[in-house]
Amino acid sequence: MMRDYEKLVLWLKDRTGIDLANYKSGQMHRRLTSLMESKGISNFQEYIKLLEADSDAFDEFFKRLTINVSDFFRNPERFEDLKRSILPRLLAERKHLKVWSAGCANGAEPYSLAMLLYELDPASFTQHEIIATDIDLTILAQARRGIYSESEMKGVSPQRRRVYFKLVGDRWQVRSFLRQQVKFFRHNLLLDPFPQGCDLILCRNVVIYFTNEAKTKLYPKLRASLRPGGVLMVGGTEPILRYQDFGFQQLGTGFYRRDGE
């Protein structure tokens, strides 16, 4: 089975540029084995044939591969830290911020960040640069539309719904003034060049799936993407071990400030 899985790894890298060698093999193997077996297929060689022949099966496979789980104000205590401490400090240092949501999935995270920026700095809101990236083009198209079901809105208060959303049938759409401020792009964290001069990067619940070797390569790139004094926010289950070795200071749970020049 593992030899067949290695064939899938090579096929996927050739097809999409995604290298599963950078992901924890046990986790990924279990996830994809479960999906494959749900199709009544017993080996990865047969699964590759299905993925090549059936675009719907490939789309399902790709969604399982890239996770695509996100919520508005996920881990609300960390977003409260952003609003009360991190963003005010950054706004005191720079008039216009450049922020990046890396691995943005359905867009809930960058839109949450945009709401905070509007609440803190409404007069200059349109001067801030908010970029959001993901590897999955399908989920990026969904994020650009900014339409969410009631169950996806559980983290949004009634007051914020009134200000930032409008009802479209039985779903909620992000109002245009907020959507227009977030720029979505396809980006592979393990392959593509990074944006530069960022004041804040949110990279949460992504590297938890990476190998230690991949993380060791990623953190210096994230640091280089920040301006001196810029802040990296990571997920609560993925603290940066030996953060000093990567040129960071820890500001609090999940927050790391870039040292130096």
Image (cartoon, rainbow, N blue to C red):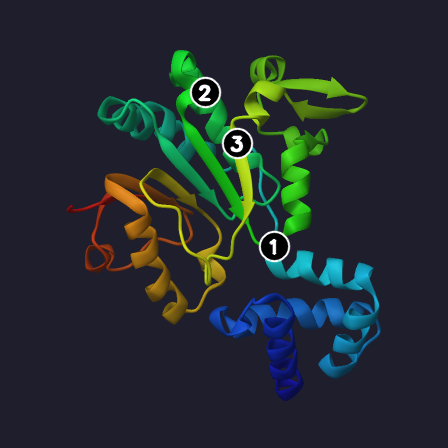
Find residue 58 and report its image quarter: bottom right
Please report whichever mark, 2 or 3, sits nearer to the chain's N-terminal start: 2
Q: Residues within 10 Å of mark 2 (few under 14, many from 20)?
A: some
Cα distance in 3D space between marks 2 and 3: 10 Å
In the rendered structure, the answer to whether residue 187 lies left or right of residue 176 reads left
- Residues 117 and 95: in front is 95
Tell me residue 108's x, y (percent).
57, 35
Amino acid type for the residue under numbered disc 1: Ile
Relative to the observer, which residue lies in front, 131 or 173? 131
Label 3 sits on a secondary structure element that is strand
Q: Is residue 39 visible?
A: yes
- Circle 3 sits on which residue? 182
Q: Earlier in the sequence, mark 1 or mark 3?
A: 1
The percent position of residue 223, horizontal first and vertical second, equals 29, 51
* C-alpha gap between disc 1 and disc 3: 21 Å
Tag of residue 143:
none
Query: Looking at the rendering, which quadrant does residue 118 occupy?
Result: top left
Looking at the rendered structure, the kind of residue marked 2 is Thr
Label 1 sits on a secondary structure element that is loop
On screen, residue 31 versus residue 133, left or right, reads right
Query: Is residue 1 shown left or right of residue 205?
Result: right
In the image, residue 40 lies at what x, y percent?
A: 84, 74
> Which label belongs to residue 67?
1
Q: Mark 3 packing: few (<14 Cα in 10 Å), some, or many (20+)?
A: many
Q: Position of residue 185 (x, y in %)?
A: 55, 44
Residue at left offset 58%, top offset 37%: 107
Residue at image point 69% right, 48% down: 138
Residue under pointer 2: 126
| Residue sitting at x 70%, y 30% | 147
Mark 1 Cα shell of 10 Å, populated few (<14), some (14-19), many (≥20): some
Which residue is outermost to the left? 260
Comparing marks 1 and 2, which lies closer to the viewer? Answer: 2
